[in-house]
């Protein structure tokens, strides 16, 4: 076995020991600083993001299969991430036969619906687990706004934390419907909560116009996107949006600002926010399975004074 794969094996087994048998079945086994691959476990499925600059060889795939067996995963899948920015259509995928299109797995005893047949991610970003947990623990009777909601994992956490109302905003109805499935799988009613198909920027403008306020706002956008031909770029728009969110907070409220932009360090993010918004800030929560802090989500909580 190649040396790099040996490293992946060692790290996988070590992290697996730390998490296996707990109430979380979705966690990172190897972070990117390990060997230019990210290995995440989602219950019975090993999900490998391949960032090496050549495709996996037959022997790499055989080793990944062995790794899956070693940690008790029935299935494995490899997503080729090389050149995705330049050519998203070039994505390549390898998987064992029988890899499910859809399945479920738990995070902190919360059930998520996962899919291999809808996009490049299975529907849950493991590097936000600790922030979801924080939200769940602090949202009793709170009004929560989740922008760029995707499969509504933050919304599920807030609703389980007994938030009084959770609003999930995303441009994609397909993702909002997936989010509603996640509510249903956890016995959460969707009535009393809002699922709004809208551009997050338009939603913030509407909220401002109507004078709505929130106790918690999640601002966790993709680095780039194009909604109805209107491009969104984190570099230009994250800070003004964070300011708009901050203005909508009720006294004592908090905004989670998050970005995966690899060219911004945590220091850059903090510095940019500080220039525009003077408030208390603290670094977001993180768990021990996330070791490459520069390439995973960089998260900050901004708090409004009481
Ligand atoms: C990287 S995900 C966001 C991750 C999410 N916050 C989570 O916790 O899983 C990207 C999501 O942003 C949505 N999106 C992209 N541009 C948008 C926009 N301008 N307004 C609202 N949603 C948008 C996409 O449809 C997708 O669901």
Image (spheres, rainbow, N blue to C red):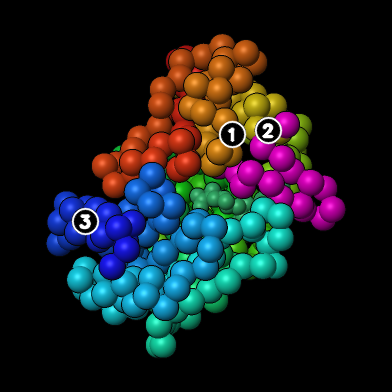
Is residue 302 at all visible to an observer of this figure?
yes
Q: Residue at x 68, y 33 (%)?
A: 235
Name the residue rendered at 34%, 71% in the picture.
64
Upstream in sequence: badge 2 or badge 1:
2
Residue corresponding to mark 2: 235
- Foreground: disc 3 or disc 2: 3
Judging by the rendered image, the residue that carries numbered circle 3 is: 10
- Say which residue appears at 65% left-offset and 27% top-offset: 239
Measure the alpha-carbon separation of dots 2 and 1.
9 Å
Q: Residue furthest right?
A: 229
Instruction: Please state if 276 lies on the left or on the right of 115 as rendered.
Output: right
In the rendered image, the residue lying farthest to the bottom is: 98
* Left or right: where 2 falls relative to 220: left
Q: Is residue 130 visible?
A: no
Residue 263 badge: 1
- Where's residue 259, x and y in %? 55, 38
Which residue is farthest front? Answer: 2
Label 3 crowd bin: few (<14), some (14–19), many (20+), radius 10 Å:
some
Q: For the residues carrying marks 3 and 1, which lies nearer the camera in this image?
A: 3
Identify the secondary structure beneath mark 1. loop
Give the camera-side residue of 260 and 139: 260
What secondary structure is marked by label 3? helix
The stretch of residues the image draws in magenta is 220-236
Label 1 crowd bin: few (<14), some (14–19), many (20+), radius 10 Å: few
Asked if residue 55 is among those painted magenta in the image, a careful observer would answer: no
- Residue drawn at (42%, 64%), measured in percent from left and top? 48
Contact check, label 2 and label 1, Cβ < 8 Å: yes
Helix, strand or loop at label 2? It is: helix
């Amino acid at each position: 076995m190649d040396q790099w794969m040996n490293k992946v094996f060692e790290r996988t087994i070590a992290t697996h020991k730390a998490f296996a048998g707990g109430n979380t079945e979705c966690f990172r086994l190897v972070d990117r600083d390990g060997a230019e691959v990210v290995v995440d476990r989602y219950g019975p499925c090993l999900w490998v993001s391949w960032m090496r600059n050549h495709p996996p060889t037959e022997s790499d795939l055989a080793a990944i299969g062995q790794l899956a067996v070693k940690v008790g995963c029935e299935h494995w899948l490899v997503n080729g991430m090389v050149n995705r920015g330049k050519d998203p259509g070039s994505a390549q995928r390898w998987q064992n036969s029988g890899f499910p299109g859809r399945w479920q797995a738990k995070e902190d005893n919360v059930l998520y619906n996962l899919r291999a047949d809808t996009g490049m991610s299975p529907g849950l970003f493991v590097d936000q687990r600790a922030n979801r947990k924080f939200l769940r623990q602090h949202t009793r009777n709170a009004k929560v706004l989740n922008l760029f909601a995707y499969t509504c994992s933050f919304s599920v956490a807030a609703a389980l934390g007994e938030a009084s109302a959770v609003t999930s905003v995303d441009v994609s109805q397909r993702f909002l419907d997936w989010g509603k499935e996640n509510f249903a799988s956890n016995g959460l009613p969707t009535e009393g909560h809002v699922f709004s198909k809208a551009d997050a920027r338009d939603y913030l403008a509407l909220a401002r116009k109507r004078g709505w306020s929130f106790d918690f706002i999640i601002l966790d956008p993709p680095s780039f996107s194009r909604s109805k031909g209107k491009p969104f770029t984190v570099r230009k728009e994250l800070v003004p949006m964070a300011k708009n969110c901050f203005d909508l907070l009720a006294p004592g409220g908090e905004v989670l600002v998050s970005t995966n932009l690899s060219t911004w360090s945590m220091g850059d993010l903090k510095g940019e926010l500080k220039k525009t918004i003077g408030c208390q800030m603290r670094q977001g929560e993180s768990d021990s399975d996330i070791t490459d802090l520069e390439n995973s989500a960089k998260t900050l909580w901004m708090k409004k004074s009481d």
